[in-house]
Amino acid sequence: MPKKIKNKKNFFTFQDVVFNLQKYWSKYGCVILQPYDLEVGAGTFHPATTLRSLGPKPWKAAYVQPSRRPTDGRYGKNPNRLQHYYQFQVIIKPSPKNIKQIYLKSLSSIGIIAKDHDIRFVEDDWESPTLGAAGLGWEVWCDGMEITQFTYFQKMTGIECKPISVELTYGLERICMFVQQKKNIFDIDWNSEGVKYKDVYFQSEKEFSAYNFDHANTDFLLKNFEMAESECKSLLEKKLSLPAYDQCLKASHIFNLLDSRGVISVAERTGYINRIRELAKGSGSIWLDNQIEK
Amino acid sequence: MSELLIELFSEEIPSNLQINARKQLENLLKQNLSSSNLEPKTLEIFSTPTRLAIFITGLPKIIKIPSTEIKGPKVGVSEDVINNYAKSKNLNISDLLEKKTEKGNFYFAKIKGREINTENELAKLIPLTLKDISWKKSMKWSDFELNWGRPLISILAIFNEKLLKFKFAHLETVNFTMLETEDQIKQIKVKSFYDYTNLLRKNEIILDHNERSEYILKKIISICKKKSCKETINQSLLTEVTNLVDKPNIITATFDKSYLELPKEIIRSTLQTHQKYFTLVDLKDRMLNEFIIVANNKDEKKLIKTGNERVVEARLSDANFFWNRDKSYNLIKQINKLKKIVFYENLGTVYDKTQRLRKMAYFISDQLNINKEKLEIASSVSKSDLASDLVSEFPELQGEMGKYFALNQGFEQDVSNAISEHYLPIGNSSIIPKKPISYSLSILDKLDNLVGFYLINEKPTSSKDPFALRRSAIGLLRTIIENNLVIKISDLIDYFIRIYLDQGVKEKNTQSKKELINFLRERMKNILKEKRIRTDIIEASISSHNNDNFLELYKKTLIMNKFISKELGKNAVSTYKRASNILEQERSISKDGPDAVLFKEEEEKELFERINIIRKAFTVKEDRKNYEEHLKLLSDTKLSTDKFFEKVKVNDDNNDIKNNRLELLQILCSTFNTFVDFSKLEGS
């Protein structure tokens, strides 16, 4: 029987961290969304960020996004690495003047009190070749540990952003390891009923690592990539930006899987990335056109 | 005394941008103040991550501009022109003066002396100066138009205790600064620089980056002393850390001793490059399991210390995991994995590169007379570590890790060393590889880069050199000259081109060999300039250099430079000049060389003999050449040449004899020019 955690003060479980961040950003005025229902590599790929950061309309949203990076899988053997993990994503357009203070306050809601720690903003400029996106910002360090990516988008799907959005991406596992003082991701307390991260995700890490590295059917995936690409293009012709973008996300995830299966030669790599970027660009510009028409 | 204080408060600006902005602000302000007739007593720029501050003292209240007369159009030009000129100076035609100058009569506008309020001038000048800062990387934020290093939040501007009002982009100046405490930000009024720094100091913020750097350094040195450690401080890390904090707090922390079994480079990379801590080594160069954190906050609950220790623990345990696994991966088997790492688009993979290096090892080991098998092995495994997780985690450890893997797998010491040393020299002043296997591999690796990029026509331009080909070329040349190597680079380039083409690379530049040799020659010029060699000597050497022996070029230049103002050099130069002066006046001289039968005087014969001796000496085998001897031979012709000019009249009535004498002088000059191009040398 799992041991219950007695109500310790200032102890935050994995789900507490999610709840508290949601509550905090909800209070701030964000739309609290749910994860996007497709495989994505990061919270940025959620259309609530990618597409909503385009155009003039103000937007505030926050959500958890399960993210998949097939090549980061370690069969559950590495204490710091996962092929599937969680990001908590906040996107605000236009970026508010006192965003730094607003962000620091959010930390205190999950047990990180700024005055007791060394919180540092370390230069980290961000670029996503598949999304045709770039931004400037920092990784936020807490006592030497990176806990958040803090980025001002300058360009998205190849389009200059105006006004500029700010994106905050909290690495939930890292933050939990930090506040719970754990050395191994799998030891994170998921809830206060004794359920650990390991209980929820260990088997999945093992199986998916095997799938990502050894068993994913590459012929099937290659066909799928082509299909997603052509579907995306045909939807773009019909000016359906969101369905088209879904196909772009699928193509992107298939590419990541093919990459981790090691079947994409180096010479082909750039070609694939360019193809996905074209899909993202098309989706972005049609989404923007459709916005203005309304 | 008057004082001007400007503070640009922003979100955290990265270290290199801060440094750059400080420099630019200082230069731009000096220029702009001076063109407004303002000469400050002091001008200082300070920065912290969030503050960029300007402090200027000694500006007058009033700028006095003396009266001047400004020259206008010539008297007699059309009325329109005169009218326009007067208008442009805010005058009527009747206000213009007529004045005589050397070039005739001109209209002059008399501009009265004026007095300008400094405050008004500053309100114009400061925003223009700020606008002129060019950020290496800049950004926009919110819905503003301004481009800045990071979001600019407010501008404090105080001139003589009063708000200096001006607008800059969407911002208007204010008389308060910002103070961040925990998760709050407060506005605090400021009246003077004294006020300002006092306020910051009360909050433990050190505004002056130099003072901050010294403070950190002092603390670190005292820790080193206490622990009997070497007091060598990583200077670039110190600069970066200084610009990452404004209230430094130096904390000593530890990690588990067992990690000391990892290669030092891994620990140093983890701690210094990734985490920005200072590592400690004792006097015997052994690393301690202690490190120094420069935090930006007090650590009353000791959470900062333990937090950082946990991060180090996690990172080292990660590295340890990779190290233990990677070191046992057979380097030869790893070569195949390099097929997945691109060298450069259109130039194949790193695997292809190692294949080229291995094939080239065969040729260069012949030229340099070194162990062929060892160089082939070193070439083959030189890049294998790039396929390891350790190097993908710590890219800065490429080569170093390969060396450790190789040693661990029983490769010979010199082969293992070559894996790390072939990347040398890293900067223009860093050390070069000194051991045969290492320097041969280094030369091949650099030449491979150069040939490849020239072949696909990705050549450096005056402003852009994305593949660091200049650095490769200088590294290559330094390795050759500092190891005293005679290499047939031209042949090596030919072989490289052939292998590249065999591998299926598409040639986009058919002149690559010629261009590359010229490129190397140009880089040689830079190396020689750095050694402060007279430019005419460099020109003379480069101009006569028509082969691919760069060691020869280097040595001759040094010899010329050494002797140019001594007897040896002077004699050679004056002899050459005397002969070439006569040739200059003649139109065409046959290049066949003189005919010994036509010599009438003893002096002619003697000079010709001397020349022949020299020419013979010049053609000895490379390794037996002594360039000082060569210069001495040239210099020694002075005697024969002087005698020649004393006794022999070049302008003989018989045209054949005259021409024969000119040809003799011509061959004398061309002999000199095969050493260096004497016509490029100045004076004496």
Image (tube, coloured by chain):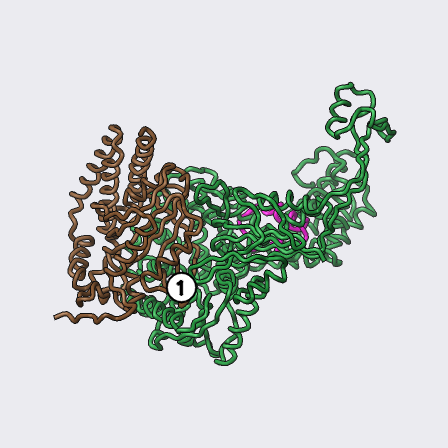
Q: Principal SS element in the magenta part?
A: helix
- What amino acid is labelled 1 in the image? Ala
Residue closer to the observer: B202 or B361? B202
Residue B252 placement (x, y as % from top left): 44, 74
Residue A44 placement (x, y as % from top left): 31, 47
- Residue span colored magenta: B528-551
In the rendered picture, chain B carries what hue?
Answer: green
| Horizontal side, residue B355 vs residue B606: left or right | left
In the rendered picture, chain A carries what hue?
Answer: brown
Residue at the image position 20 percent from the left and 70 percent from the top: A5
Q: Is residue A47 visible?
A: yes
Q: Quick one: SS at disc 1?
A: helix
The reply to whether the magenta stretch includes residue B122 is: no
The reply to whether the magenta stretch includes residue B536 is: yes
Give the residue pinned by disc 1. A114
- Disc 1 residue crowd, few under 14, some 14–19, many 20+, Cα 10 Å: some
Residue B362 placement (x, y as % from top left): 39, 55
